[in-house]
Image: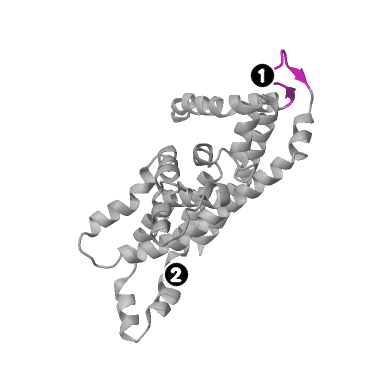
Amino acid sequence: MAMLCQAPSVILLLLWMIVPLVMTVWFSLLHYNLMDEGRQFIGVMNYVYLFTDPSLTDALLNTLVLVVGVLLASVVLGTLIALLMNQPMHGRPVVRLLVIAPFFVMPTVSALIWKNMLMNPVSGLFAWVAHLFGFPGFDWFANAPLLSVGIIVAWQWVPFAALILLTALQSMDREQLEAAALDGARPLVLFRRIIAPHLARPVTVVILIETMFLLSVFAEILVTTGGGPGDDTTNLPYLIYKTALLDYDIGGASAGGLLAVVLANLVSIFLVRTVAKSLDR
């Protein structure tokens, strides 16, 4: 009886997942361009073109650099912020609220703020500070485009890591820390011997969750650099968007979408197994 009650939901979920996937697979086997009339079956030619396109190599490399860079920033800065917020201070609830606030800002809004109010080489805050010290304004999106996008994305995800790690810090045994401090353990020794091992599992969870979202970074690139200069900030999601909506090549974009699905599943399987092993210890 329970299975019959669950059947409609399961069937609807399967249709929700399978129908778009099957359509994407079918479109990837067609010459399907919105500028041409009709559709023609061409087999795996879209995949051949995709894997021989130099833009794919740049997109995969940019995706890797962006994901790894933001993860490093999230873990390192998130740990430092969590340690600071775990200290006794006046107005600690307000500080925690302010720290976590960037995570709830929509990516498009945060990208516009950073582009126009902070990183603008003429009227941005960073340019104003540089002028105070006699330096010219730095054109972030022209001279360091991928770094600029990474800073914007990290600004949103560092608070998430800090919140998770702060929760882990608050669950630590305070008596153990106090006993180690009474025995003369210095702060660095406390962190290396006690705090860091305790944070190993939360860090793994942060990496798992953030990686799934960072593989699909798109709005920040669209708003700030448009994938440029050249292909300097084009990651895999933006390459798919450009192929579909700028080149009108639905077949090629479908092939790229399937590649993205395969890569995301491979990464998720690896990370889930890593988390499982970490939790079993």
Residue 166 at what x, y percent from top left?
Answer: 35, 60
Residue 98 at what x, y percent from top left?
Answer: 29, 52
Tell whether position 31 is magenta.
Answer: yes
Q: Quadrant of the N terminus?
A: top left
Q: Which residue is disc 2 drawn over? A: 196
Write the residue at 30% across / 65% down. Answer: 86
- When the figure is inspected, residue 192 is found, relative to residue 235, above or below; the finding is below
Q: Which mark is residue 82?
A: none
Label 2 – label 1 distance at C-alpha: 54 Å
- When the figure is inspected, residue 188 is found, relative to residue 251, above or below; the finding is below
Instruction: Please tell me whether mark 2 or mark 1 is closer to you in this view.
Output: 1
**How many badges with numbers are in the image?**
2
- When the figure is inspected, residue 61 is found, relative to residue 50, above or below; the finding is below
Q: Which residue is disc 1 drawn over? A: 34
| Residue 272 seen in render | no
191 to the left or right of 230:
left
Type of the residue with mark 1: Leu
Residue 189 at what x, y percent from top left?
Answer: 42, 79
Which of the two discs, 2 and 1, labels the residue nearer the N terminus? 1
223 to the left or right of 194:
right
Q: Secondary structure at mark 2?
A: helix
Write the residue at 79% across / 24% down. Answer: 42
Type of the residue with mark 2: Ala
Tell whether position 123 is magenta.
Answer: no
Mark 1 surroundings: few (<14), some (14-19) or many (≥20) residues within 10 A: some
174 to the left or right of 133:
left
Residue 71 at what x, y percent from top left?
Answer: 51, 55
Q: Which residues are magenta?
A: 29-41
Write the residue at 40% across / 43% down. Answer: 113
As drawn, which residue projects farthest toward the top?
37
The chief SS type of the magenta part is loop
Query: Which colouring convention does the figure follow?
Result: one colour
